[in-house]
Image (tube, rainbow, N blue to C red):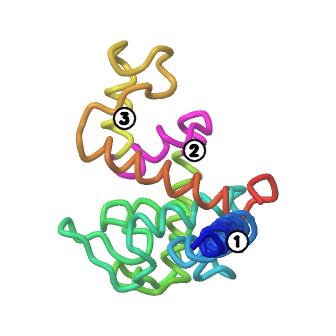
Amino acid sequence: MHKTKPARRTLCLLLALLVLAVCIFGVPPLYRSILKMRYPQKYSALVEQWAAEYDIDPLLLYAVIRTESGFDPHACSNVEAHGLMQITEVTFDWIKSQIAPNEDISFADLYDPALNIRFGAYYMKRCLSRYHEDVPTAAAAYHSGWGTVDALLSSTAYSSDGNVLNVFPYQQMNNYVAKISHAYARYRLLYSPEGA
């Protein structure tokens, strides 16, 4: 009887050491691999190209695409926003007038990842530039429009400086900004040199 207690203690100690070793050496890489599956870098050539063209962190574009469409190029929202970065027809027409006035493209062409990422990256850059490179405010504008964000900025209840939003008062806007912020943080953790 006495001989089995030390054997059990040894076995328990070995098992505890094994669990500890797995936790220290095996789980973080496994967890990181699982997270990378949940936060992929699909369409990387296009994302990198247009991020460089418009001087945007490509990780932010991945966060927007993941949040907007889950990387589904055929996504269509209930407000008829199309493609990877979910661009509405009004926004498409405005972007086209800015960067592609003479190109033979239509709103239906936004299901093409190359066009969608090009237009979405341009629009995100304009949002960032307009709102002092503040990602949450730019995300709110990308989702709800410049007019909505500009109106909120004029109220001290939502902005302390009139330049960026400190409060996102509408539930959909608030949820969207939280999703973008969370996804962007994950992408930076997983893929940026500082996050590695």
Looking at the rendered structure, the secondary structure element under dot 2 is helix
- Could you classify mark 1 by the number of other residues whose Cα lies within 10 Å: few (under 14), some (14-19), or many (20 or more)? few
Residue type (three-letter) at the residue carrying disc 1:
Leu
Q: Distance of mark 3 from mark 1, alpha carbons?
A: 59 Å
What span is colored magenta in the figure? Answer: 128-144
Q: CA distance from mark 3 to mark 2?
A: 12 Å
Q: Nearer the viewer, residue 23 or 67?
A: 23
Residue 14 shows which numbered tag?
Answer: 1
Q: Residue at x 41, y 59 (%)?
A: 94
- Which is nearer the N-term, disc 3 or disc 2? 2
Relative to 105, is 118 on the left or the right?
A: right
Q: Position of residue 64 (x, y in %)?
A: 48, 62
Can residue 58 be seen by looking at this rendering?
yes
Please give the residue where the numbered disc 3 appears in the rendered image: 149
Mark 1 or mark 2: which is in front?
A: 1
The quarter of the rendered structure image containing the C terminus is bottom right
Residue visible at 47% across and 85% down?
104
The part of the image, by quadrant, that contains residue 28 is: bottom right
Q: Magenta includes 141?
A: yes
Mark 3 Cα-neighbour bin, 10 Å: few <14, some 14–19, many ≥20: many
